[in-house]
Structures are given as C-alpha cells and as structure tokens.
Image: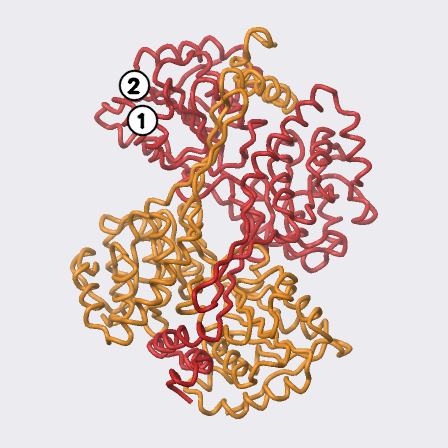
Chain colours: A red, B orange
Amino acid sequence: MSSQIRRLSTLDANFAEQFRALLAYEEQRDPHVEGAVADIIHAVRKRGDEALLEFTEKFDRVKANSAADLEIGQDELKHAFDTLDPDQKAALKVAAQRVRAFHERQVAESWEFTEADGTRLGQRVTPLDRAGLYVPGGKAAYPSSVLMNAVPAKVAGVKEVIMVVPTPSGVKNQMVLAAAHLAGVDRVFTIGGAQAVAALAYGTQTVPRVDKIVGPGNAYVAEAKRRVFGAVGIDMIAGPSEILVICDGTTNPDWIAMDLFSQAEHDEMAQSILLSPSKEFLDQVQASIKRLMDSMPRATVIATSLKNRGALIQVKDMDEACELSNQIAPEHLELSVQDPDAWVGKLRHAGAIFMGPYSSESLGDYCAGPNHVLPTAGTARFSSPLGVYDFQKRSSIIFASREGASTLGEVAAELAYGEGLPAHARSAEYRVGPKFKKAD
Amino acid sequence: MSSQIRRLSTLDANFAEQFRALLAYEEQRDPHVEGAVADIIHAVRKRGDEALLEFTEKFDRVKANSAADLEIGQDELKHAFDTLDPDQKAALKVAAQRVRAFHERQVAESWEFTEADGTRLGQRVTPLDRAGLYVPGGKAAYPSSVLMNAVPAKVAGVKEVIMVVPTPSGVKNQMVLAAAHLAGVDRVFTIGGAQAVAALAYGTQTVPRVDKIVGPGNAYVAEAKRRVFGAVGIDMIAGPSEILVICDGTTNPDWIAMDLFSQAEHDEMAQSILLSPSKEFLDQVQASIKRLMDSMPRATVIATSLKNRGALIQVKDMDEACELSNQIAPEHLELSVQDPDAWVGKLRHAGAIFMGPYSSESLGDYCAGPNHVLPTAGTARFSSPLGVYDFQKRSSIIFASREGASTLGEVAAELAYGEGLPAHARSAEYRVGPKFKKAD
C-alpha cells in the first residue's frame, strides 16, 4: 500500500499557495440531489405517512403496512442493550456516564436583575420541546453518535427525543439500538434519507414534528436539512473530518502516525495534517506511516486520504504552528507537546483541543466527555461543538415598572420618531407618567 | 381608513382551522432572486473590488473610482455623532449604555475541571475575530439596529466589526453613522445588497473577510446570506415582525390598540394578535383601533396589516391563552396582565416577553436593554434573541493524564473496534499503560 504524503515547509517559496490548495475544500452541491430532495420533501409534506412508506420501500427495501410498523418499541431497545456483549455494554455505559457528566456543566440557567426603579430585566432559558436525531444506517451507524447527540438533548431537558435510523433491507444495528436505550431516546423510527428529515420537520400522521434536527447523514440528508431549515432548527452541515496535530517532536512518532491514520480512516476526503518545527521528527513520522500502513485494516482508505489531503509541514517554530492552526481552524487539534498550557492561549479557533502526548483524538470520539460533533471545514472560526446549548433557547424578560416605563418611554419615543415609527413612539408615550408626558 | 380586524373565539366550531390559516406564513423564495444572487456572489468572489464597484454603480447609483472610496472614515462617523440633534444624541447614548449593560451579563466564561487521575476537561470560550454587520439603506435604516447588532459583538470581544450600508444615490443616514460611532464599529463601507454580503463572506482586495454576518436586509440580502452560510456564519433569516398580546382585560384598551399598531406599522405583512378571556375588552380594543386609526401617520400600512394578518381572539381563560401562545411561539409577547409572574412559567416559547401593563414592546425595541433582533415565524421554538453568545464560540479542552489515557483508552478502543474503526482503537491503545495494554 502506498504511504505517500505531501511534505511542505513554510520556508518553501510558494508555501502560501500550496497551503491554500491543501485546505481548499468546497462542498459540491449536486443539482440532481437538490431536485430529488425537493420532490421527496414536497411528497412527505403533502401525503404524510403514505409517502413515507413508499420512499422507505423504494430506498431501503423495507415494506411496511403502516407507518406505525416502522417504530421500534422501548422493549426492543432495552432488549438490544440487555443482550449486548458485556465488554461493549460496560464501555458504552462508561462513555454515556462521562458524556452526561461533562454536558451537565453546560446547562445554562435563567437570570434576572432588578433596577433601582423596580424595572426587571432578564433571560429565561427553556429547553426545546422535541428534538429529532438522525442516525445513518449501514456501515456508518455509530452508537457513539447516538450518545453524543441524544445525551445533550436529554441533559437540556428536551421532553421528547425522536430518533430516525434507516434499516436498509431491514438490518438493524443492535449497538445503535442499545445506545438509544442508554441515552434515553424516547421514540425510534426505522426511516432515513430526505423522507425522514421531512417527516421530522413537518410531522406526519405517525411521526411527530420536532423543533430541531441534529445528526450526520449523506448528501441527501444534508440537502434535506438545509431545505427544512427555518421550519425547524438544524445543527451544522458536516464536512469531511479533519485533524491537525502540532507536535514539538517529543511524542512517540508511531503515536502521531496512528493519530493521523485515525482521522484518515474515516473516509477518503478526511484530512490529516501534522505541523512540527523538527524536520527529523517529520521524517520519523513519515517512516512510521510507511511501517504501520500495511497493518491497518482500512489501509486503502487511509492511503488515499493521506495522499490526496494529508500533509507533514515543517514550521519555523511553535508560534508559527499556532498561527497556521488559527488559519485552518481545525475540527480536531492535537497539541502534542510537553507544555501544552504554554501554547493553548495562542489557539483561537478549534472544535476540540487535545492537550499533551496522552490525549489522542480517539479518546474524545468516544468517552472523554466532550462532544464529538464538532465544526468542520474552518467553521470553528464561528461555531462550537454540539452541546446542551443547542437544545436550549432564551427568551428576554422585560418587566418595566411604572417609573421605569416613564423614563424609558421618553428615550424610546425620541428614537422611534427619529426612525419614522410614530406608533412605536405613542405606545411608549402612553406609559410616560403625567409630568413627563410629551404627547396626547 | 378601514379599521377592520378579524374576530375569533376558541369556541368557534372551526377555530383550529382559522387559527392555522391565520398563522400560515411561508417565505416565498423567488427563483429570479436566487439566480441573480448566485451570479452576483460568483462575480464578487472572482473579480473582487472590480465587481463590487460595478454593482454599486448599477444598483445604488454610486460611482466610485476605487473600493477604498466606498469606505467611511472614523472622523466622518464621529462628526455625524457630534452634530446630531442633542435630544437624539442623549436618547441614543442612554440606549447604547443600557444595551451594553444588559449584554455584558451574557458573556460566557471558559471553565475547566480536573478529575481524580489528573485528567483535565473544559470548555474555552473565545470571540470571533471579525463580524460583518449589514444595515439596510433608505427608509428602513434604523440606528437602533446598529446598536443591537454591533454592541453584542463588541461586548463579546470581537476585534473588528465591519459595517456595510448601502447609500442609494449617495444619501447617507446621519443617525445610522452616529450609532456606528457610538457602538464602536471599526470600519464602514457604503455597499449593500448581495454584493456586500459576498464581499464580507469571501473578502475582496479592500473589504476584509469576516467570520459571521448579522443584520436584516431585503430578499436579495436574505438569499445571499443563505448562500454564503457555511463559508461564514449568519444570524437568522428574519420574517415579518409579530406581536402577540395576552391581556386579562385590565390594561387601558388604547394602550393595547397602540401596541398592536406599533407592530402593524412595520410593514403590511407584520402580524398583531390579541388574546383575551374578556369579550368586552376585545370590543373596547376594537373601538380604540377604530378611533385611533385615522390619527396614525402610517395608517395605510397599519390598516392593511391588521386586516390581512391581525386578529382579536377570545379565549376561555388565561391557561388557554398561554397554550395558544406556545403554539405561536411569538417574536414579541406582551403579557399585559396584573400578575404576570403567575403566568410567565407557562410560556415556553417567545423571543421576548414584556410583562405587566407598563412594558410596551417599543421599550424593548429601543432602550430596555435586551436585544430587539428576535426569532420570528415560530422559530422561537428553537432559537434565541441575538446575543453575545452569537459572537463567541467554544472549543472543548481534553488533557488526558497518563493514568487517564490508560483508563479511557481501553473504553475508547472497545467502542472503536465495535464501530469498525481500528486506527481509532490503536491510537487509544498506544496510550494504555503496560499492564492494561491489549494490543501491540
């Protein structure tokens, strides 16, 4: 198997250009997919369960007499959990407990304060009523994703979490069902694709309408989420997974090579980049890549990903490494150095930062506690890991006292007249006390 | 002027149907707009300043020799502020100070905790580097919107806030420029439309690329924001403004009528709804509407809005009013009752809640302190007022100790093998201490 990977140095004359080319990724939107998804959504909105049954038979080769037959009961979820391999069950329980404990720290609380004149202002925090969780079927069915999406929703206080998971040809993933049980998912439907997204967004006779849809999916699912956005909330549309490793040269090169592999094995578009000030260390990692490649079960995917999208980059120093990292705004950032606390303050944008040589990214994927749903493709510049905050929303509270309304009313009226909105002004002026009153 | 407004009662046989029809609003997306916007964005991405200058001449009738000429300097902003009418200036200062004070309470702080084995987990909160603020030109140029969008960004710690505002035929709104000065906007460009959104999203030779674009705009601006989403963050795409008033019948009916007017005067699609258990009170408000209508400068807009989208609805009791309010999830909710604290706990979804008879919605529009950019069209079910949190993002911190990596590594490896991701498993196993080590 090829173990080819691009070598760059920031001293190269054309480095800026090469770096830009390396990072260039633009989601390709396929007009055929866009059209097909629009039709599917339209059909599900119009014909509900009937359309849902047709599409499920057509795309997943699952024939059901009624949409109710597509629901998996709580007893079946519990059975999947009870009969799971004991080691897997124990691991899943540790993961769920740690993810829950971390996310409990994210719960936002309502607050309010009272001003001198008795006016009260505040922010009420409430959970969404209902969340929809899309779980891909087939090969990419990950129980860890069920935990990472469902647990924050439950911690936020979402009353009903509805999971959808396609079961192509009727094959169910028992570990996914076990994770749903463990995470406290309320209802599960064996539907997928754009039709499942449409059912969650608008509701059918059987599938309840939700307030937000989260979870990864293929191009059809991504396009469907994009289209229903506004009718419901959605999480980010995820791009290929990425890792950036910054290493000072003191971590075992085999460890770093495997960390790069762990990203590359996801899919051929995944991106693994290593930055180091040490040319010798980069050479060592390259040798590790070569030596370890053939032992990897997913070597074909890894090799393609590293060849097309990977890079080992020599930097002048750690400061430059941090600067390049800020330009990338990586999903996963390993700061594999002896004193990570000395550098973390310079890193402005990243989904998750793994500090020190022992923090492999895979710990974060499963059980460290923080979420593994992270902003990709540079979106860490402006967005955050999935969290409890995605399942809570805020309402402002304004309780003007009689005196407060009088004082504020004059200010509001002045500005409202200035903006040419006289009804706004008069509505405020009605509440201005007699001695201040300007109008009426 | 007509003062027609729909009267409904929840006791009507077909109430559910009428209520659904009343709320039905679906944003119309125009394929012509979609195509035009795609072309404009493409041109600005490809040709930068040159395209920006062409579109600005074409759409705004402003001819400039270079994109630099489209920038308004800080001195001009300060001059606009210094020469503002003293009453307006005083009002703007009170508003800015109160908006800032409220938003300072929203600043999220980083946190971290250490587990027994030395593993550290946490969440780092950092501001966006750069935010773009779209301000509409012409009639709908609102200085209050400049404050409401720019102040939270500055409170969050955004280093550079770039404002764009079209100046059709070269006309600048001095109050908008004054507000930009007061809010601490860093740079202002007199550009607008899809071309301004494209310039902010991708950058040109002159306009810097931002990380997130906020602020309202027309259909072209909304479509452009939708299209650049992913390359940059965006705030919500706002629908028409709405108010829901719940009144127990004890507030002055003239006040309530004016509150409904203040929403209706925004535009003909704005929605004003009143719920009350008292038929007599609804009659009184209807009489106030009739009596006050002709005195309103914007009576034509108000009358159209109330006729097409307004309603006075009689409910059985306050509980039913709260239930209907939760179905609507209104942008603005006035709880105009004697004891609002008794009811606010039942209201699950609203952008902002105005409590008691003195809290007119217009106080919130200008100077109470909370943001006036609020979720419309039922999106309060899953989204929040614009806030400091929109200009901050989080990075997870995972610092596994040697012992922590050993314990967690076994769990992660178990789950990774279960998901068919062996490189993930081995990357974790490398860090498992000798006595636990399963592989290698």
Image x and y of residue B8, in percent? 68, 80
Image x and y of residue B242, in percent? 53, 71
Q: Could you tell me if residue A311 is visible in this image?
A: no
Q: Quadrant of the C terminus of chain A?
A: bottom left
Image x and y of residue B285, in percent? 59, 86
- Total number of numbered labels? 2
A66 relative position to B122: left or right: right
Q: Nearer the viewer, residue B310 or A96?
A: A96
Q: Which mark is residue A277?
A: 2
Q: Is residue B100 above or below residue A61?
A: below
Q: Earlier in the sequence, mark 1 or mark 2?
A: 2
Q: Could you tell me if residue B244 is visible in this image?
A: yes
User: On what subunit does the disc labeled 2 rest?
Assistant: A
B297 relative position to B279: left or right: left
Q: Nearer the viewer, residue B276 or A43?
A: B276
Q: Which residue is mark 1?
A: A321
Q: Amino acid at mark 1?
A: Ala
Q: Could you classify mark 1 by the number of other residues whose Cα lies within 10 Å: few (under 14), some (14-19), or many (20 or more)?
A: many
Image x and y of residue B29, in percent? 50, 63
B166 relative position to A99: left or right: left
Please tell me which residue is depicted at 53% across the width and 86% down the height of the picture. Answer: B254
A185 relative position to A22: left or right: right
Determine contact: label 1, label 2, CB under 8 Å.
yes
Q: Amino acid at mark 2?
A: Pro
